[in-house]
Image: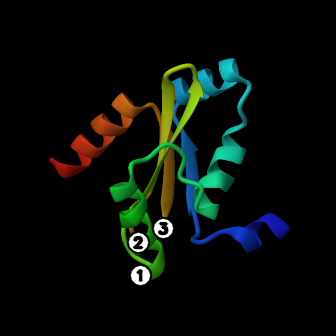
Amino acid sequence: MAKDDTNLFPLGRTVVSKNALAVLGEAGENPKRLFERHAAGDWGVIESKSWYLNRMAVDSGYGSVASAYAVLADVRVVILTQPDRSNTVMALPDEMQKLLGGLSQ
């Protein structure tokens, strides 16, 4: 598939939370398109420090890669690829925080 040639890193298994899927459906946005943007280095509406950290993670081949996309007015979805590239999760910001909090406990 030609689109894979533009990926800067592998996504591994992709997972979308139910709430993110609902918001994307309401916005008429396809989650696959956002995963493609994420993997291609279009990290959406993140601050410059996060962009720099993403770039370091991609260049080194290790480290989390994060994106955020405004999809419905002020509602955003975030995407996080794990450091080992085994999984990439798309969720609402508050869901991602809970997920990351659960992982650190």
The alpha-carbon separation of the residues under discs 1 and 3 comes to: 12 Å
Residue farthest right in this picture: 1
The residue closer to the viewer here, 87 or 53, is 53
6 shown above or below 102: below
Element class at badge 3: loop
Residue at label 2?
57
Element class at badge 1: helix
Specify which label sits upstream in the sequence, 2 or 3: 2
Amino acid at the residue labelled 1: Ser
In this rendering, the label closer to the viewer, 1 or 3: 1
Specify which label sits upstream in the sequence, 1 or 3: 1
Locate residue 47, reporting x and y percent. 39, 49
Task: Tell me how the rendering is colored.
Answer: rainbow
50 shown above or below 53: above
Residue farthest front in this picture: 48
Q: Residue at x 64, y 45 (%)?
A: 34
Whether residues under marks 2 and 1 lie with C-beta atoms below 8 angstroms apart, the answer is yes
Residue at label 3?
85
Count all numbered tags in the image, as a single digit: 3
Question: Residue 60 got which mark?
Answer: 1
Q: Could one spot residue 1 in this view of the protein?
A: no
Location of residue 8 (image quadrant)? bottom right
Locate residue 91, reporting x and y percent. 47, 36
- Asked whether, in this view, residue 3 is left or right of residue 27, the answer is right
Element class at badge 2: helix
Amino acid at the residue labelled 3: Arg
Q: Residue at x 49, y 21 (%)?
A: 74
Whether residues under marks 1 and 3 lie with C-beta atoms below 8 angstroms apart, the answer is no
